[in-house]
Image (tube, rainbow, N blue to C red):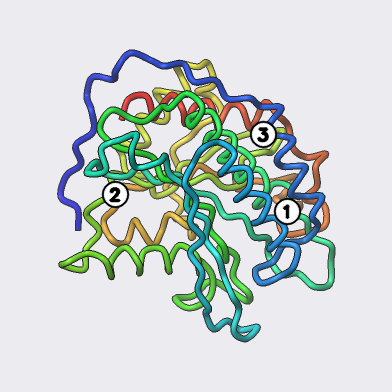
Amino acid sequence: MVASVAFARSPPPPVHVQFDADRALAAVQKQVDFGPRPSGSPELKQTRAWLVSELRSYGLEVREQEFDADTPRGKIHFVNILARMPPTMFDQNKQLVVLGSHYDTKWLPKIRFVGANDGASSTGALLEIARVTAQTRFQPSKARLEFVFFDGEECVNEYTETDGLYGSRYYVSQLKSKSPNGKITNIQCMLLLDMIGDRDLSVRLPDATPELARRALDASEALGWRENFHISSQPMIDDHRPLSLEGVPSMDLIDFEYGPNHRWWHTEEDTMDKIHAQSLKMVGQTLLKLLEGL
């Protein structure tokens, strides 16, 4: 377990990295245009090729983390996408700040589920954060960024220790396997985005490490969006969980209330008309503001 975290108490001068909401929205649309994107599908493979191409065009080093896993649908081939600044630019001994999103959609064979919010919104926002930080060569003062696009966040039947969070569980297993003592020591914190495109945005911070939650609320208040961000005591099974269980300070930014009585979640109604560029901007710019102080 991680006993303490060395967060910078006095943030460096702000770099004012600007999040382009229109580009993020276009990235959401691009994913939706591929159609339903469950793990192992041709559509997800096409999405992955596009994401990798985009990330490399920003000057980032990209690695595809491939693995096979048994699921209730049988064995599936999963691929996480990992991207960082080139090693020549920054001190490689610095700890990582991991920024994550899942890019798969849930396997729902009886409906056309394109996941505009659940999968595409957070991935579009994370892609834009990767672009602007790469182009400005921005990194936190005491850490370096790693962008992780997780495959297999969605469970096939229901979340258990072996169903769901396939990509993040594998990512953690690889970190532990490369550590001499089997513990994760090279990650300062993990910041996850999920379902953040809803026009009626109300971001919850479930299970968040208190210091990270405070920083997120402070960042949103500084930008004038504090009323859209809230602390939540409700547990959330999401891709931050495997890292949190290993003692990594973690935070999930998610608006889980999607539509009247949550009725759009995992339905054919999760479409582009429910997504708004301003929601993407509020989350993306808040996260960038938070990073300035790490």
Q: Amino acid at mark 3?
A: Ala
Q: Which residue is mark 3?
A: 24
For the point 25% across and 32% down, the residue is 142
Contact (Cβ within 8 Å) of mark 2 with mark 1: no
Which callout, 2 or 3, points at the residue further toward the start of the chain?
3
How far apart are the alpha carbons under marks 1 and 3? Answer: 15 Å
Q: Which residue is mark 1?
A: 115
Q: Position of residue 190 (x, y in %)?
A: 38, 47
Q: Nearer the viewer, residue 165 or 202?
A: 165
Residue at far bottom of view: 74
Q: Nearer the viewer, mark 1 or mark 3?
A: 3
Q: Nearer the viewer, mark 2 or mark 1?
A: 2
Q: Amino acid at mark 2?
A: Ile
Placement of 135 over or under 240, stated as above or below: above
Which callout, 2 or 1, points at the residue further toward the start of the chain?
1
Q: Position of residue 178 (x, y in %)?
A: 26, 66
| Dot 1 crowding, Cα within 10 Å, few <14, some 14–19, many 20+ | many
Q: Is residue 233 left or right of residue 75?
A: left
Task: Give the quarter of the figure containing the N terminus.
Answer: bottom left
For the point 63% across and 74% down, the residue is 156
- Point out which mark residue 187 bears: 2
Task: For mark 3, give the secondary structure.
Answer: helix
Task: For mark 1, give the secondary structure.
Answer: loop
Q: Position of residue 247 (x, y in %)?
A: 26, 56
Q: Position of residue 33 (x, y in %)?
A: 82, 50
